[in-house]
Image (tube, helix red, strand yellow):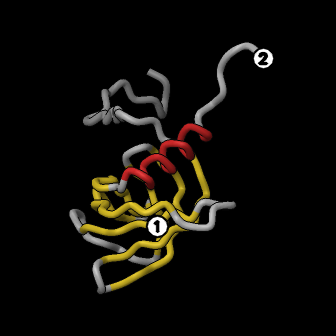
Amino acid sequence: MTAGVSSARPLYTAMVTRRHPRFSVSLSSTLVHKDHFSHAGSVRNISAKGCRVDSIISPFTGMQLTVQLHVPGELKPILIDNATVRWSGSAGIGLEFLTIAPLHQDRLDRMIQQLQPKTGIQ
């Protein structure tokens, strides 16, 4: 055996499989919890059903939020009526989108479509 190299197997190997692909972005956002607070955030990645946000707040897992996604070039934000905090820590806040009005869902879907890599012969 070579010095510094171990043949021991890791105790735990995590494999994350996602139903919806994530895309790196840099979007401003506003996180609102009922009438208790409204804080700015920076969306770092997004999918059709959630996002990761950097913010000064540390919400608890399960907290319900309204999220406004401020898309450059658009006058009004995409409104996520209800999102739940799935995790929160030094890597930011993981949100799952639960309720989105059809108009805002269409806008989110178009934005996600534009983020997907282009395929095909040109």
Q: Which residue shows up at 78% across the image and 17% down it?
A: 122
Q: Quadrant of residue 117?
A: top right
Q: Which residue shows up at 31% across the image and 36% down it?
A: 14
Q: Quadrant of residue 58?
A: bottom left
Residue furthest to the bottom in view is 36
- Please determine whether, in this image, residue 23 is positioned above or below residue 39: above
Using the image, tell me which numbered label, if any, was put on residue 101.
none
What residue type is disc 1 on?
A: Gln
Q: Are marks 2 and 1 in contact (CB under 8 Å)?
A: no
x and y, in percent, of residue 22 in the image: 48, 41
As rendered, which of 44 and 83 lies closer to the eye? 83
Using the image, tell me which numbered label, if any, was put on residue 122.
2
Residue placed under numbered mark 1 in the picture: 68
As rendered, which of 19 and 114 lies closer to the eye? 114
Residue furthest to the front in view is 103
As rendered, which of 11 and 107 lies closer to the eye? 107
Q: Give left or right: position of 115 versus 85.
A: right
The answer to which of marks 2 and 1 sits earlier in the sequence is 1
- Please determine whether, in this image, residue 113 is positioned above or below residue 29: above
Residue furthest to the top in view is 121
Q: Residues within 10 Å of mark 2 (few under 14, many from 20)?
A: few
